[in-house]
Amino acid sequence: MPVIPIEVADDPRLSDYRGLTDVALRRSLEAERGLYMAEGAKVIARAVRAGHSPRSLLMTPKWVDGIVEALGAAATDVTLYVAPDDVLEEVTGYQVHRGALAAMHRPVLPSVANLVRDARRVVVLEGIVDHTNVGAIFRSVAGIGADAVIVSPTCADPLYRRSVKVSMGTVFQVPWTRAESWPGVLDELREAGFVVAGMALEEGAVALDEFAARADERVALVMGTEGDGMTRAALAHVDVPVVIPMAGGVDSLNVAAASAVALWELRVR
């Protein structure tokens, strides 16, 4: 592994890592270069185990040995940039507590048909804009046991640094793709044999436990954006609206918390 010391923040070789806190900049930059950021030795190692390839790494000196060990054979063809803490902070825009960053090549996403071919539980995210919520939902999917995630064209990027971090790297183990047709993908799921359930505060919505008692073989669970929830257009394409019964005058849960409750109730037994 080539190890290259970096002494100044404006070194052009660090352009992949510049401005990590600027969401708009990263959205355009990462799309243009076909990359995403992974942060921390555990997350980077999970990405590599999932078959993702790093194009370079940036870290402080104390993390070098641990990262090389975590990467194993994958480390041989990767350039490793080493810089002091203050240089990393100036480049990235924040203090890199986990000490190591990797610019990873983005994987090719599967088609919806291939993604759901053998799935029984699929989570569909419509327009969720908070990367923390996206990461938390992926963690629930991985931990509770759904099979795949589909994100709408307007949904935040599951491979954005914050999403990856909050998910604890589970975005690498959960099969997912981005829908090209919205809300047409919901019809595609129905044609594939899924009951499409939308989590929504709708009149006549079925209580989650009652819906779970139906024990449908294949369920696609749609979660709407923060605040407004599912759009009317998407609701017109679901088979049944579902609601989590609440108490104490509270009308609903945060979307990430709601996903965990719903996935637990709908888990395959």
Image (cartoon, rainbow, N blue to C red):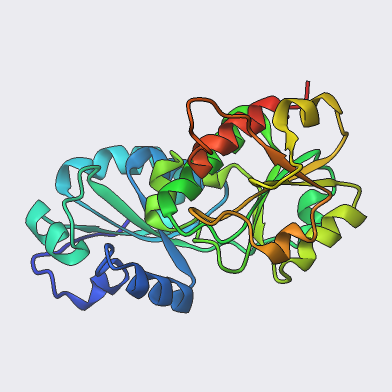
Q: Is residue 269 left or right of residue 46?
A: right
Q: Is residue 139 left or right of residue 215?
A: left
Q: Residue 48: horizontal and vertical position, in percent?
A: 49, 47
Q: Which residue is at 53% across, 46% downward?
A: 171
Q: Which residue is at 51% across, 41% downward?
A: 256
Query: Which image quadrant is residue 20 in?
Result: bottom left
In this rendering, the answer to whether 203 lies above or below 58 is: above
The one of 249 and 231 positioned closer to us in this rendering: 249
Q: Is residue 2 left or right of residue 62?
A: right
Q: Is residue 261 visible?
A: yes
Q: Residue 27: horizontal and vertical position, in percent?
A: 42, 71
The one of 229 and 136 positioned closer to us in this rendering: 229
The one of 42 and 248 positioned closer to us in this rendering: 248
Q: Residue 232: horizontal and vertical position, in percent?
A: 69, 63
Q: Which residue is at 20% across, 49% downward?
A: 96
In this rendering, the answer to whether 206 lies above or below 48 is: above
Q: Is residue 170 visible?
A: no
In this rendering, the answer to whether 42 lies above or below 105 is: above
Please state the total of marks drawn on the protein image: 0
Query: Which image quadrant is residue 36 in?
Result: bottom left
Split into 4 quadrants, where in the image is the N terminus?
Answer: bottom left
Q: Residue 228: horizontal and vertical position, in percent?
A: 53, 57
Q: Is residue 83 left or right of residue 191?
A: left
